[in-house]
Amino acid sequence: MADATQSSKERVRKFVIFFTFFLIIFTAAVQVFLVQREIGYIGLFLPPTLVFVSMTVINYWKCVKVDSSAKSAGKAPSIQTDGWRYCPYSGCSGSVPINSRHCHQCDICIIQRDHHCHFVAKCIGQNSLPFFMVLITSMFGLTLTYCSANLIYITTHETPGTLLLTVVAPIQVLWYFLGYVSLSHCLISLNIVISFTAFIGSIILNYHEYNLLFHNKPYLTKSMPIASSGVLKMSKLDRIREVFGKKWYKFYVDPTHQSTVQKQYGVTKVM
Ligand SMILES: [Zn+2]
Ligand SMILES: [Zn+2]
């Protein structure tokens, strides 16, 4: 029974990952071939589109692949020692790093758990957080590029009368099947709605996540419990270095970069 639940969970996870990849590539193709080529600013919009799509795809894949679970901390001691605690839930039922929190969806403890991400279909924790931060930053850049191109498209190709119909994408899909609009108009309409929704979503997500990052959260940091109690105030730069490592900026420009913070998968002792 447990195995059946596990395999259905795995199937859902694979579907979510496949669907997200499909959505990224599909919206990019519609943007470039229908919107950007049509408005004639391809030289202006294509380079940022390619850069941000690559950054989004690579960092999304890293979030999917990188393990932040308690197992990534190495072999757990069989007796209780400093830096470890006991987790009673079935997925763990043993020693886990003290700076980890149990996720009931993943059914395992995650080191410095940030949140359970439904798009990645797993938790974002210590080892994947840097990639997640770059992912949401590049998502913002990508959707900003799309929305700018879409805005030019709307102002040059739409009248106020057709605009309302264009931004109501579900009606466009129906219109297409009834033969009132072309497939390309229907796809552009979908692209406008998806990009605008993702743009607003990415603003909220970036604000929320950078706010957490700068204010000593996720609260189970390495300096726990001193940081979470507010006694130890870290500067924003120190906080960035704690999560990303000293060369934090490399994550934003070099997709192959991996920091020493991530390689030290072991537990940092509580001071
Ligand atoms: Zn646990
Ligand atoms: Zn989780």
Image (cartoon, rainbow, N blue to C red):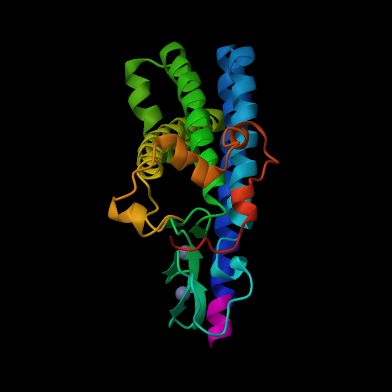
**In the image shown, does 45 or 167 lie closer to the viewer?**
45
Place residue 214 in its image quadrant.
top left
Which percent across, then down, holds residue 36? 58, 19
Magenta span: 1-6
Check the image and report above or below for 21 versus 77. Answer: above
Q: Magenta span has 5?
A: yes
- Residue found farthest to the front: 271
Q: Magenta span has 84?
A: no
Which percent across, then down, holds residue 181? 48, 30
Please report the residue visible at 35 percent of the width from the left and 56 percent of the height from the top: 226
Quarter placement of the C terminus: bottom left
Judged by its main secondary structure, the magenta piece is: helix
Which percent across, then down, holds residue 100? 46, 66
- Residue found farthest to the left: 230
Residue 225 appears in the rendering? yes
Q: How many marks?
A: 0
**In the image shown, does 156 or 256 lie closer to the viewer?**
256
- Residue found farthest to the right: 256
Which percent across, then down, holds residue 220? 40, 58
**In the image shown, does 214 or 175 lie closer to the viewer?**
214
Please report the residue visible at 48 percent of the width from the left and 17 percent of the height from the top: 153
Check the image and report above or below for 63 versus 79. Answer: above
Place residue 86 in its image quadrant.
bottom left
